[in-house]
Image: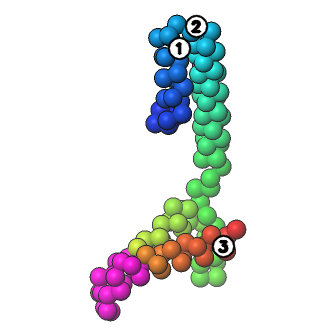
Amino acid sequence: MGYSGEPIPWMIEATAFLSVVIQRWEDFAIIFTLLILNAVVGFWQEHKADNAIALLKKRIAPKARVLRDSAWREISAKTLFLTPESTQVVGTLIAVYGVFMTPIGWELAGFVWGYALLSFIITTS
């Protein structure tokens, strides 16, 4: 589970430890029971999330149907995703380093990428 870095569970575990040190067994029993219950619920939720991700991976289409040269064709969905992304990366590097043009610098390139991401989010919502 990915909860080991959070401070609140650490504080609760420290409270359980201190309850043992000062011999407050009722408090320790309650805290320990809640910690175990929290671990079981967290494990169950992660198990359900893993199953949901596995189901989504099964439903992802490996092929995409596209219109090219006035004809419908099936191509790999990875190709459909990677082509515009790689084109944008190459275009950014050309613009930043000034190949065939005056360099624009990383600040402006970051702004352009942010604008592209924002417009993508707005238009696909």
x then y, percent, for residue 36: 60, 19
- The answer to if 62 sits in the magenta stretch is no
What number is the disc on residue 122? 3
What residue is rendered at 32% in x and 92% in y? 101
- Residue receiving disc 2: 25
What's under tag 1, amino acid-wise?
A: Ser
Mark 1 neighbour density, 10 Å: few (under 14) some (14–19) many (20 or more): some
Q: Secondary structure at mark 1?
A: helix
Write the start and end of the magenta stretch as one range.
90-109
In the picture, measured across the screen, residue 106 lies left or right of residue 67, that is left
x then y, percent, for residue 79: 50, 66
What residue is rendered at 51% in x and 29% in y? 11
What residue is rendered at 60% in x and 47% in y? 57
In the picture, measured across the screen, residue 108 lies left or right of residue 35, that is left
What number is the disc on residue 70? none
- Work out which residue is located at the far bottom of the displayed protein and give it: 101
Residue 72 visible? The answer is no
Circle nearer the N terminus (1, 2): 1
Of 45 and 29, nearer the camera is 29
x then y, percent, for residue 4: 47, 32
Circle nearer the N terminus (3, 1): 1
Between marks 2 and 3, how big is the CA–CA gap? 56 Å
- Residue receiving disc 1: 19
Occupied quadrant, residue 91 = bottom left
What's under tag 3, amino acid-wise?
A: Ile
Occupied quadrant, residue 32 = top right
Between marks 1 and 2, how big is the CA–CA gap? 7 Å
- The answer to if 108 sits in the magenta stretch is yes
